[in-house]
Image (cartoon, rainbow, N blue to C red):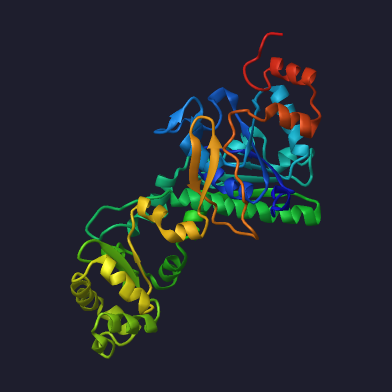
């Protein structure tokens, strides 16, 4: 199966760590790309290996979630022999992918201008907090900071509550996907034209770019987004969370037909003809009255009672699940969104699958690699490094602290 996966002919050297970078490349690995993690032995490899609460001796369930189907090579790129070995791998690879602070790729000499003499077709993709240029390029950037700086927190939460972060690291994850898309696009161009390039991707750009229509409204009409009651959509009514007799549901009437179906299912079809609610513009103008009527009606029954009624009527509706409930949803199983790997420490590890689909999904997954697990194998298979030469590299400190001969 692996040789038939869409990206089986790609080789990516991933100088990556923690969440955003590995999240981007795990989708490529799932699609068959050979993702070789270049891990720094001076710091115990990828910091994600040590992320609590489920971490022990360089293994963690956090690391497993971001690094399945990858391989690991330990190389000290500050060591001359480590750097020399890295450059040999660059010569036989398609891309060097990193997620480091914006000024670090230049210091580490892993930009296109630093490596093009080795491989003119190499693609160098940097995913950083703020990019490799600009006034903030030397600053460390994390998801929390970016959600605040890019305005996301200002529109999340209740109007009378504090600015609120998303419950998930959405800037990190979105940035990883943007980096993967950028890198794949650049590899395509390099194969077509014979010339590689830099991909300067940042979490900041990603977060600002995802402001989309809110930004357009503000830039052109001065609109200022604010937090809305029960996560209501800024312009569509009704499109928000509603309390039921026992929990919460989301109802979204993005089209007029859904509003008409909703009021019919609620037993109040006359609301559709009420001039206050008859059109999307009227409902927007009279949002408080419209939402209040709906809240009073929806509170009369439980979520379990409303869901079948509204679904049968063709109204866009969903329960507000907990994470355990979401993972137990039948549709999660139907879509194959939980995959398994086998691990000597953790046993059978269940984790969510990549949502990226191109043809038939991968039918078998490998656990995340141990630190340096594939160093000798990869150097032998790709570079022809024999046992004697490998021993010399080890003694010279290419894989960590120098050892005595």
Task: Using the image as rendered, state which of residue 84 and residue 23 is in the foreground.
Answer: 23
Residue at 39% x, 78% y: name it.
314
Q: Is residue 236 visible?
A: no
Residue at 65% x, 25% y: name it.
78
Q: Can residue 60 be seen in this view?
A: yes
How far across and how far down the image is residue 271, in percent?
A: 25, 86
Residue 152 lies left or right of residue 95; in this view the side is left
Residue 157 found in image quarter: bottom left
How far across and how far down the image is residue 230, in percent?
A: 27, 64
Residue furthest top as drawn: 405
Above or below — where is 391 with respect to 71?
Answer: above
Residue 403 lies left or right of residue 164; in this view the side is right
How far across and how far down the image is residue 362, in percent?
A: 62, 52
Residue 92 lies left or right of residue 130; in this view the side is right
Task: Using the image as rendered, state which of residue 102 and residue 393 is in the foreground.
Answer: 393
Quadrant where the C terminus is found in the figure: top right
């Amino acid at each position: 199966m692996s040789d038939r996966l869409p990206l089986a002919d790609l080789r990516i050297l991933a100088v990556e760590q923690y969440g955003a970078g590995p999240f981007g490349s795990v989708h490529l690995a799932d699609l068959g790309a050979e993702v070789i993690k270049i891990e720094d032995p001076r710091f115990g490899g990828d910091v994600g290996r040590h992320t609590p609460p489920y971490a022990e001796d360089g293994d963690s369930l956090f690391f497993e979630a971001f690094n399945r189907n990858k391989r690991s090579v330990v190389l000290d790129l500050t060591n001359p022999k480590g750097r020399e070995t890295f450059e040999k791998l660059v010569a036989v690879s398609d891309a060097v992918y990193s997620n480091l602070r914006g000024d670090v790729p230049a210091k580490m000499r892993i930009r296109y201008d630093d490596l093009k003499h080795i491989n003119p077709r190499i693609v160098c993709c940097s995913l950083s907090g703020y990019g490799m240029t600009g006034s903030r390029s030397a600053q460390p950037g994390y998801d929390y900071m970016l959600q605040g700086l890019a305005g996301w927190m200002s529109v999340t939460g209740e109007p009378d509550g504090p600015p609120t972060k998303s419950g998930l690291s959405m800037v990190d994850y979105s940035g990883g996907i943007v980096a993967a898309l950028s890198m794949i696009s650049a590899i395509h161009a390099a194969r077509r034209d014979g010339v590689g390039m830099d991909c300067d991707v940042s979490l900041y750009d990603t977060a600002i770019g995802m402001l989309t229509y809110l930004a357009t409204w503000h830039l052109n009409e001065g609109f200022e987004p604010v937090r809305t009651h029960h996560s209501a959509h800024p312009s569509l009514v009704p499109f928000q969370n509603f309390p039921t007799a026992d929990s919460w549901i989301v109802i979204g009437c993005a089209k007029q037909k859904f509003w008409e179906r909703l009021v019919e299912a609620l037993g109040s079809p006359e609301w559709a003809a009420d001039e206050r609610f008859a059109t999307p513009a009227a409902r927007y103008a009279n949002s408080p009255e419209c939402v209040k009527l709906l809240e009073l009606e929806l509170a009369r029954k439980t979520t379990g009672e409303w869901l079948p009624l509204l679904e049968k009527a063709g109204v866009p509706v969903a329960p507000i699940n907990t994470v355990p409930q979401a993972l137990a949803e039948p549709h999660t199983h139907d879509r194959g969104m939980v995959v398994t790997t086998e691990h000597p420490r953790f046993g059978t590890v269940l984790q969510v699958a990549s949502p990226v689909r191109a043809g038939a999904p991968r039918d078998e997954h490998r656990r995340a690699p141990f630190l340096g697990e594939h160093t000798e194998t990869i150097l032998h298979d790709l570079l022809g490094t024999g046992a004697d030469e490998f021993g010399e590299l080890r003694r010279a400190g290419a894989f960590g602290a120098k050892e005595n001969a």
